[in-house]
Image (cartoon, helix red, strand yellow):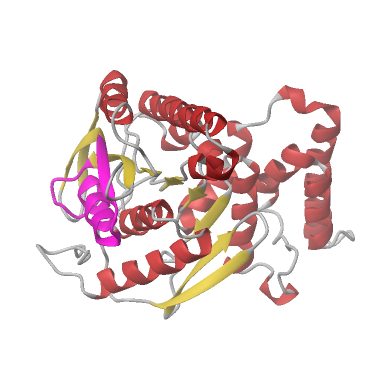
C-alpha cells in the first residue's frame, strides 16, 4: 500500500514552471498526496505566452499510464491538456480500464469493504486556450475534450470555457437513439426561449421546464437557447436572471447533461468586480464562494485549483470540503505569487 494517496495526472510540460505538470505536482504534493505525472504534450512557452504545442504520441501516453496502473494504486485522476484528440481518447480508455479494475476488486471484496473500491474521482480542467488566447493542442480543443466530459466527476471551467463548452454541447452528444420524444423536448426549449425573448408569454422558468421535460436532448438544447434568453433555474431569484450568475448556472446545467457529475465555474475572468465568484452545481446541491479579486495575472491558477481538488478528493474529502479547501489554498498561492519576468506571476504553491 502507498503511504500517500496517488493522483494520476495527465498534463503538458511547461518550461516556465508556472502551469501544467509543474503546477499539478506542486499543488498535489502541498495537499499531502503524491502525483503520478503522465506527459501528454511538450509546450514551448514562457510565463506569458504559448508559442508551440507538440503532443506526445497517444501510444506513449498509454504506455506511461499503464506502467503506473499495473503497479501503483490510484485514488484520483486529474486531467489538464490532452494535447490532441487521439490523446483524449487514450485517456478515456485508461479511465475505463482503471474503473473496471476497481469494480472487479469491489466485486471480490467483502461487503463492508466494497466502498473502498469505488470509482476514483476524475477532475477535468478543460483548458481551451492559454490566458492570452494561445492554442494548447493540435486539434479543436472543444472536439478533443468530447470523450472526457462524460467521464468527469468534476469539471472546473472558467466562465468563457463554460460558455464555449455549453454552447457546443449538441455537437458532443445528441444521439439518434434519444428518439422523437426527446427531439420534441429539445424543440420545445427553443420555442419557449423564442417566446420569452419576443414577449409572447413564456417565462424563463417555462424554458427550464421544457428542457427538463425533454430529458438529455432538452437539457442540451439549453445551449442553443442561452443566447436568446436568460434562463431561470430552481432556487435562483428572478433578480439574477440575465446576470453572470444565471448564465453560469445555465452553462453548468448544460455540462451536467453531458455526464459531468459536478461543475465548478470559476469567475476569475468576470471583469468589473472586486470579488471573484466561483459557482458549484452538483446533483443535489449548489454553492457559491466569493474571493477578493487580486491585482495582476497569474500563470497556472486553474491548474493549481483543479490539482489541489483532485488531491483532496484522493485524501477522502467530500466534494464540498475539497472545493472549499482547494479554493482557499489557491487564493493564498495567488496572494503570495512572485514574478520571474514581466507578465503573469507564478503562484506560490
Q: In the rendered view, would you say 317 is above or below 338?
A: above
User: Can you name the residue that lies furthest to the right here?
Assistant: 201
The one of 164 and 119 positioned closer to us in this rendering: 119
Q: Give the total of numbered labels.
A: 0
Residue 242: give x, y in percent of width and height: 66, 67
User: Can you name the residue that lies furthest to the top here?
Assistant: 59
Residue 292: give x, y in percent of width and height: 39, 79
- Residue 98, image quadrant: top left
User: Can you name the residue that lies furthest to the left here?
Assistant: 340
Residue 105: give x, y in percent of width and height: 49, 31
What residue is at 28 percent from the left and 54 percent from the top?
A: 28
Instruction: Let me know if residue 35 is in the magenta part.
Output: yes
The one of 43 and 200 positioned closer to us in this rendering: 43
- Residue 231, image quadrant: bottom right
Q: Can residue 293 be seen from the camera position used here?
A: yes
Horizontal arrangement in the rendering, residue 141 relative to residue 30 (left or right)? right
Residue 182: give x, y in percent of width and height: 81, 34
What residue is at 26 percent from the left and 35 percent from the top?
A: 38
The one of 282 and 226 positioned closer to us in this rendering: 282
For the N terminus, give its image quadrant.
top left
Instruction: Let me know if residue 266 is in the magenta part.
Output: no
Q: Can residue 296 be seen from the camera position used here?
A: no
Horizontal arrangement in the rendering, residue 164 relative to residue 140 (left or right)? right
**In this picture, which residue range is highlighted in magenta?**
13-38
What residue is at 65 percent from the left and 43 percent from the top?
A: 257
Q: In the rendered view, would you say 111 is above or below 332?
A: above
For the C terminus, give its image quadrant.
bottom left
Horizontal arrangement in the rendering, residue 307 relative to residue 180 (left or right)? left
Amino acid at each position: 500500500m502507498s503511504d500517500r494517496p496517488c493522483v494520476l495526472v495527465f498534463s503538458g510540460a511547461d518550461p516556465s514552471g508556472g502551469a501544467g505538470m509543474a503546477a499539478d505536482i506542486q499543488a498535489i504534493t502541498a495537499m499531502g498526496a503524491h502525483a503520478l505525472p503522465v506527459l501528454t504534450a511538450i509546450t514551448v512557452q514562457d510565463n506569458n505566452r504559448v508559442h508551440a504545442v507538440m503532443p506526445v504520441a497517444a501510444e506513449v501516453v498509454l504506455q506511461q499510464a499503464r506502467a503506473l496502473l499495473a503497479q501503483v494504486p490510484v485514488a484520483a485522476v486529474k486531467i489538464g491538456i490532452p494535447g490532441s484528440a487521439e490523446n483524449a481518447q487514450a485517456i478515456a480508455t485508461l479511465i475505463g480500464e482503471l474503473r473496471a479494475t476497481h469494480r472487479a476488486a469491489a466485486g471480490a471484496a467483502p461487503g463492508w469493504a466494497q466502498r473502498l473500491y469505488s470509482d476514483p474521482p476524475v477532475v477535468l480542467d478543460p483548458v481551451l486556450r492559454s490566458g492570452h488566447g494561445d492554442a494548447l493542442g493540435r486539434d479543436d480543443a472543444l472536439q478533443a475534450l468530447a470523450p472526457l466530459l462524460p467521464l468527469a466527476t468534476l469539471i472546473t471551467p472558467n466562465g468563457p470555457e463554460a460558455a464555449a463548452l455549453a454552447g457546443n454541447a449538441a455537437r458532443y452528444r445528441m444521439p439518434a437513439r434519444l428518439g422523437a420524444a426527446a427531439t420534441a423536448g429539445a424543440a420545445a426549449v427553443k420555442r419557449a426561449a423564442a417566446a420569452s425573448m419576443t414577449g409572447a408569454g413564456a417565462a424563463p422558468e417555462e424554458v427550464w421546464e421544457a428542457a427538463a421535460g425533454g430529458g438529455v436532448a432538452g437539457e442540451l438544447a439549453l445551449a442553443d437557447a442561452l443566447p436568446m434568453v436568460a434562463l431561470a433555474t430552481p432556487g435562483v431569484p428572478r433578480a439574477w436572471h440575465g446576470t453572470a450568475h444565471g448564465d453560469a448556472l445555465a452553462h453548468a446545467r448544460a455540462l451536467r447533461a453531458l455526464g459531468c457529475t459536478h461543475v465548478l465555474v470559476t469567475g476569475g475572468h468576470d471583469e468589473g468586480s472586486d470579488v471573484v465568484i466561483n459557482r458549484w452545481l452538483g446533483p443535489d446541491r449548489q454553492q457559491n464562494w466569493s474571493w477578493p479579486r487580486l491585482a495582476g495575472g497569474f500563470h497556472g491558477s486553474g491548474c493549481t485549483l483543479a490539482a489541489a481538488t483532485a488531491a483532496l478528493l484522493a485524501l477522502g474529502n467530500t466534494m464540498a470540503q475539497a472545493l472549499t479547501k482547494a479554493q482557499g489554498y489557491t487564493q493564498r498561492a495567488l496572494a503570495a505569487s512572485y514574478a520571474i519576468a514581466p507578465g503573469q506571476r507564478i503562484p506560490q504553491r
